[in-house]
Amino acid sequence: MRIWRLSVVLAFIIIFGAAIISRLFYIQILNHKFYQAQALGQQSGFSEAQGQRGEVFFKNSQESKGERGTGDVKSLAINKERWLVFVMPQEIKDKNILAESLGKAIGESKEFVLLKIENHDSYTIIKKDLSKENIKEIKKIKLDSVHLENITGRYYPQEKIASKVIGFLGGDGSGQYGIEGYYDDILKGKTGIKEEKRGLDLINFSNTESDLNGSDIYLTIDYNIQFEAESLLKEAQKNLNINSGQIVVLKPDTGRVLAIADLPPFDPNSYFKEKNLDIFQNSAIQKIFEPGSIMKPFTMSMGINEGKITPDTTYVDAGFVKMGPETIYNFDRKTWGKQTMTGVLEKSINTGAVFVSQLISNQTFLDYLDKFGFNQKTGVELQGEVSSKNNINGPDVEFATASFGQGVGVTPLQIARGFSAIANGGKLVRIYVVEKIVKGEKETETTPQILDEQVISTKTASQITTMLT
């Protein structure tokens, strides 16, 4: 009997052992590839990833070093981690207790918190941009309905400086105005898939996530020159009581923009607080104005370039010019008598500009307006640039007044580019504000570009420069 029982137990052991060996053979030999893939699948996975937005920098006194592309950079638009506190109203047991304790933690009143959660039954942000002290105090609150969240947001460390150049990132995640708007597609991080490889206690992300980041942009704008330009506008606002104004600084031989200042500025970090949306517009590229007497050097260059006058050509100013039923006067109705063309520019005499315009045809005048770039955008890489079309087709009096800048429409940047052509030996260049675009190891630099043949001859440009001096 004992031998029979022993035989039965031994048989069970043999059968059980054979089953285990068979199973191991099946798993490890016959089907090992399947289980190997399954094991790897537990160690790695894929999830959706959003690349970070590219950052924007401008130069810091690079021009003073006399070399293109040298000098330090200064951040204009960066990505910064920010903490916010939010509550889930449906989790709140006592609104008054929550409002009082949370209000103290974030430095706000109890009423402030109650107003935030009033009439909300879902995720409600109480305050953004928490300080380290705020976070420390919030963590002491023992309420399940209070939550901290760390997010990456756009931050403009220079605040109001160059605000019309950079624009801002809107609440919907798209760039608005300036560089942020113009280069939104290039700056914007892409959505893609990232691979996660898990160890026992560690998660490693593959480097494909960095490939989703947007490109960084380096501007031609010099921080110190921009700062000085904006300081001058603030001083003018204080001393002259002006409401708006622009300062544009260009390199005439390359078209590189060193500063575009526009008053009044705004803070891109709190753009949503602005009530008047006009403040976001950059008047240097979005404001058409009549240039007035700064048009006279261009009229004079037309006459010299066409061989109709020289700097020493004279005429007699009577203080006015009759054009049919119309009469054109000098400023303040002054009479200057016999004057050279250089004297016309020195004293800014309206009738002198009319004298020159009458020596050239109306079509020639229009052709030069086109050559100087007054009928097309400069192409600067800022969102929303505008341009007028100066098609003067009325009576001769309209051409006469246009000779000293009335009835002609330009932007401040267009007129600055026109003067750059005179300073650049008569050559018109493309205006640009981006030095280079960097994507990982790849850098794309902007190459200066001459747009057309000579607008005016080198000799004419030299003569006008001397006359303006």
Image: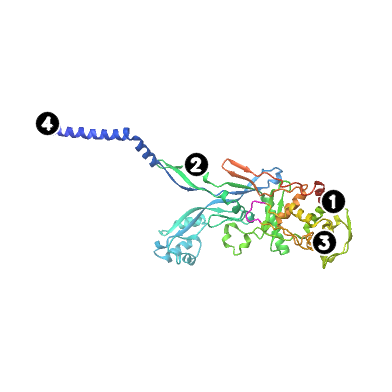
Bin the neighbour count of mark 3 within 10 Å (Cα to Cα): few under 14, some 14-19, many 20 and up.
Answer: many
Q: Nearer the viewer, mark 1 or mark 2?
A: 1
Q: Which residue is mark 2?
A: 207
Instruction: Tell whether label 2 touches label 1 (CB within 8 Å).
Output: no
What residue does disc 1 label?
Answer: 307
Earlier in the chain: of badge 1 and badge 4, it is: 4
Q: Tell me the mark number nearer the camera, choosing from 3 and 1.
A: 1
Main secondary structure along the magenta-highlighted residues: loop
Is 347 colored magenta in this rendering?
no
> Please, what is the three-letter code of the amino acid marked with disc 3?
Asn
Residue 182 higher or lower than 11, as above or below = below
Earlier in the chain: of badge 1 and badge 2, it is 2
**In the image, which residues are magenta?**
379-385
Residue 157 screen position, x and y as percent: 59, 53
- Toward the left, the furthest residue is 1
**Callout 1: helix, strand or loop?**
loop
Where disc 3 sits, the SS reads: helix
Q: Amino acid at mark 1?
A: Gly
